[in-house]
Amino acid sequence: MLGKFVINDIFKQKRTKLLLFVITIPTFISLLLYIDMHIRYKSYLYPLALKEGITSWQMLVEQQRILYFNEFLPLFCAIIISALFENEYKNNGWILTLTYPVSRSKVIISKFITSLIYMIVMLITNIICLIIVGKLSGFPEAVNEMYFAKIFFIQFMASAAVMVIHLYLTIKNKNTLVSIGTAAVLCIISSNLFYNESSISKFNPYSFASFVYGFIPVDLKILIIISIFLIVVGLAFTIIRFDKKECY
């Protein structure tokens, strides 16, 4: 039944163009990166990478911070969550959803899994586009699969932790814009803290994705522990809140 709910949630998004959103964002950012590589790679960026002792791939990922993809990843998480719930809040969709013979906890878990699926699509699209940019730019180094796997893992754990927070906010507030607005503000604050090398960033899930750049060390154990804690506790609080909610 849980699998059917996830599939049903995905089909509900056909009219919202959510899939187009999660593919377009990283694709457009990579297009801008390719233009940047075309202009500056051979004359400036590659010599700079050699000087700093990093690979062209590391330099490419580091250049992505200019476009704030990782800094605004929590905002993208909030938008995905909001899109999933917008259908339920419109036309009394919750009434139909809750008529199914399934526990409310599974409804919430289904929404969470569906949001993760869309985020996975975005993250994989991002990595594929980065590799294409590197190949088109003529990077001399081979693609480092483990490097990109680590990037995906950090981004995924950061996204999952943040999504639980906004899952709760969206359940608590019927207006999905509250969740999106909160994410936008926290993204800006967290980005400022990260670039000022605040120790808070090491424990702030809104900053976790920015650690993929590599110029600030990250303790993966702390990141994993905090992310799993937020996921477990966040889902528990969200389910309790949803169980007690009477008006949708």
Image: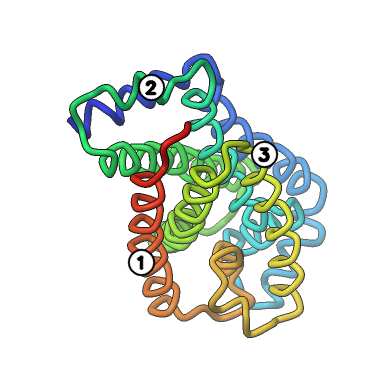
Label 1 residue SS = helix
Q: What residue type is labelled 2?
A: Ile
Report whether 3 appears left or right of 184: left
For the point 38% across and 60% down, the residue is 231
Label 2 Cα neighbours within 10 Å, binned few <14 / some 14-19 / many ≥20: few
Kindly identify which numbered label has been placed on residue 200: none
The reply to whether residue 27 is visible in this rendering is yes
Q: List the residue tagged with mark 3.
A: 177
Q: Which amino acid does label 3 sit on?
A: Leu
Toward the bottom, the furthest residue is 199
Of residues 240 and 34, the one drawn nearer to the viewer in this rendering:
240
Q: List the residue tagged with mark 1.
A: 228
Of residues 123 and 81, the one drawn nearer to the viewer in this rendering:
81
Q: Is residue 24 above or below residue 220?
A: above
For the point 61% across and 61% down, the residue is 56
Q: In this view, does 85 lie above or below 209?
A: above
| Mark 1 to mark 2 CA distance (whole Å) | 31 Å
For the point 76% across and 44% down, the residue is 38
Q: What residue type is labelled 1?
A: Ile
Where residue 136 sits: x, y (%)?
61, 40
Label 2 residue SS = helix
Q: List the residue tagged with mark 2.
A: 95
* Nearer to us: label 1 or label 2: 2
Where residue 77 sits: x, y (%)?
55, 46
